[in-house]
Image (spheres, helix red, strand yellow):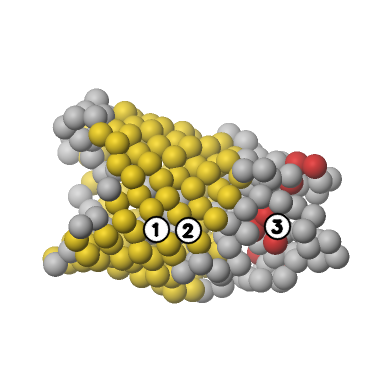
Amino acid sequence: MKLKSKLLLALLATSSAAFAQTAPAAPEVTYNVGVVSQYRYRGLAQGKGQPALQGGVDYANANGYYAGAWASQIKWIQDNSPAATPTQFSGNTELDLYGGYKFESAGIAYDVGFLRYQYVGNNLGNSTTYTNANTNEIYAAATAGVYTFKWSYSLSNLFGNPNSKNSDYFDLSANYDLGGGITLTPHIGRQLVQGPGAGSGGLSYTDGSLTVAKDLGNGLSATAAAIVTNAKSGAFNSNATSYATGKSAVVIGLKYGF
């Protein structure tokens, strides 16, 4: 996808690292594998609308500390190559490494941590237009009842966009238990991008989604998400194919946790 929009990056379909809601009574390690009809992150397509395999491992302990790793297939880096040389850029795997601390105070649950987006083997830093795609963020979230507000802040350039350090992403979501193993998760997010054009909001955008999840039992869960964004300008289209990464989509997914 067009690198300038990668910011680029609701459950299986719309987020990468999935953070545990509460600390376990004893240290534990869990695993998950899944497939989605397409990988969307912060509303934007990461794989040109194609299916993606995903999986991760998480560690959490009773003191509230946790760490994990999560990976997915992507295509946006190669798809950002110039149309004349469509394979100039490489890197088809996103590996997220994260760790943090959860605690509760006055009935509000808090979550603070660090997230590293590692784009394995990416060579965007060799170009004169972009910087290395690898990105570091810190985040803080607060949950009261069914509502969660989260803020993410980039310590590095954001997904290869030059001069985009100190960019912010704000995320408000809710998690409604409808009974019968079904949950409903509405979400709205706002990506604010620093750098050239930031003052006029050239690369900043808003995304929204509505996700339905069903617990199928025996570790299986399924999701369906309707996703919209206002990232409609040419800056959000891939160079190689002109694919519109911000167009509306319905994404389905299946995950197995163990």
Mark positioned earlier in the residue sequence (1 or 2): 1
In this view, 79 is above or below 150: below
Left or right: 127 as drawn, with respect to 200: right
In percent of width and height, residue 168 lies at 53, 45
- Mark 3 burial class by Cα count in 10 Å: few <14, some 14-19, many 20+: many
At horizontal 74% and vertical 44% (from top left) the residue drawn is 123
Contact check, label 1 and label 2, Cβ < 8 Å? yes
- Mark 1 and mark 2: Cα distance apart in space: 6 Å
Q: What amino acid is labelled 1 in the image?
A: Gly
Report the residue marked by disc 1.
34
| Helix, strand or loop for disc 3 | helix
In percent of width and height, residue 197 lies at 71, 53
Tell which tag, 3 or 2, sits nearer the viewer.
2
Left or right: 50 as drawn, with respect to 196: left
Tell which tag, 1 or 3, sits nearer the viewer.
1
At horizontal 35% and vertical 50% (from top left) the residue drawn is 32
Report the residue marked by disc 2.
53
Mark positioned earlier in the residue sequence (1 or 3): 1
- Mark 3 and mark 2: Cα distance apart in space: 17 Å
Q: Please tell me the numbered disc located at residue 137.
A: none
- Mark 1 and mark 3: Cα distance apart in space: 23 Å
Q: Is residue 201 something that shows in the picture?
A: no
Report the residue marked by disc 3.
78
In this view, 58 is above or below 3: above
In this view, 198 is above or below 156: below
In percent of width and height, residue 204 lies at 60, 56
